[in-house]
Image (tube, helix red, strand yellow):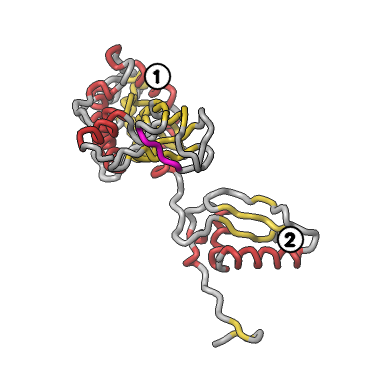
Amino acid sequence: MAISNEWLSFLRDQFPVGSRIKLREMKDPYHPMEPGTMGMLDCIDDVGTFHVKWDNGSGLGLVIGEDSFTVLPPETHLLKLYMPMTVDCYEKNEWGDTEDEPTVLDNHTAAGYADHIVAALLRERLSTETERGLMHYYDKYDSVEQKVKSCDFTAEVRDGRLWGVAECQVTGELTPKELYTLKEYISGQASDGFGEGFEQREIKVGDRELYAHLWSSEDSWNIRTEQECFVPKLADGLPELCFSTLPDTGALICIKRGESGYYKSDWSTDSREKNQELADYNNERLGVTDAQRQAMECGSMAGWSVPGADPKAYKPEEPKMGGMTLA
C-alpha cells in the first residue's frame, strides 16, 4: 500500500525513534507474538512499517491497519555534558581589606569548594525555568527542542578537579548532529547567557570571595559527554575478550575489553599447563593474537589508556615450522 510523504512525515514526528511499543495483537500467523510484548521503535520505513527491536529479541515489523499496538513516549534518561571550571579567589590582606587581584585556585583547591558552588548554581535558577531549565530559552522548534526536555547547570568533582555540568533530561537518543547543536547551545549559555551572569556573583566562604567560571576563553576549554571526557579511548584492534592465566596460581581467566581486573573461568583446572593450553586454544578459536592478549592483560591491570594496552606495542609472533623459528 502506497503512503504519502505527508503521512510518513507525520508518523515520524509523532512517533520518534526510541519510543516504546506495546503489542496488543499481531496478525502474522507464521511468527505470532504474545499480546503485551514490549519493544523499542528502531525506525519507520518509507512504506510506513514500524520496525521494532522487541525485548524478546525479535525484529518483526508492525503494519498500521493490520497489527494492533500502542506507542508510548520514549523513556527519559540523563545526559551529562562536562566543561572544565575555573575559580578566582579574592582574599583579605593583613589590614583586612580585599585584595585587588584574585588568585586562580588550583584544581585541588577549587574542588574543595564544590558544595558551595553547587549551592550557588542552584540559587541562580529562576521560577520560569522550573520545568525546562535553560531549554526554556531555546528558540528553535527542531528535534533538539523536542528531545531535550530540560537542562540545568551544576558542578561535580571528577578525577580530582572541578567540572561544570549541564544535566539534560533527554528522550530517545540524540543523533551526532543533534548532540552538536545541543553542545553549541549550552556553550553559548555557559559563555554569554547563564554563565556570564553567574561568574559575576560572589560566593562568600568565610573571609574569601569566590567567582566561578563555567566558560573560559582558553583554547583548551571544551564541552564533552561523560564518555568523551572520562572513558579511556581503547586502542584499535582489541578483541571483545581473551583468555589468559594468572602468573602466581596459573588459574585460567577471562579478560573483557575496557574492564578492570579479570573473571575466573569455569574451565579452569588444577593444572597450570592445562590452563595455558586452554587459554591458547580459546584465543586461537576467537582469533586473538598474542599481541592482543598482552595488550588486554596490560589494560586490565594498568588502565586502558596506557601505551601497553595497544597491540601495536608488541612485536607479532614469528611464524614457526617444524619447531624451528623461520628467519
What segment is highlighted magenta in the picture? 60-64
Q: Which residue is mark 2?
A: 250
Residue 326 higher or lower than 39, as above or below: below
| Pick the front one: 194 or 244 | 244
**Few, some or many residues within 10 Å of mark 2 (<14, 14–19, 20+):** some
Residue at image location 50% in from the left, 53% down from the top: 304
Please provide percent x and percent y for residue 189.
Answer: 25, 29
| Pick the front one: 232 or 22 | 22
Please provide percent x and percent y for residue 131.
Answer: 33, 17
90 sits to left or right of 296: left
The local secondary structure at tag 1 comes to helix
Image quadrant holding the C terminus, namely bottom right
**Few, some or many residues within 10 Å of mark 1 (<14, 14–19, 20+):** few
The local secondary structure at tag 2 comes to loop
Q: Amino acid at mark 1?
A: Ala
Residue located farthest toward the top when viewing the structure as drawn: 127
| Pick the front one: 260 or 62 | 62
Quadrant of res 274 = bottom right
Residue 19 badge: none
5 sits to left or right of 212: left
Q: Amino acid at mark 2?
A: Gly
293 magenta-colored: no
- Between marks 1 and 2 in the image, the one whose residue lies nearer the viewer: 2
Residue at image location 50% in from the left, 64% down from the top: 311
Image quadrant holding the N terminus, namely top left
106 sits to left or right of 55: left
Residue located farthest toward the right when viewing the structure as drawn: 270
Q: Which residue is mark 1?
A: 119
Residue at image location 21% in from the left, 37% down from the top: 4
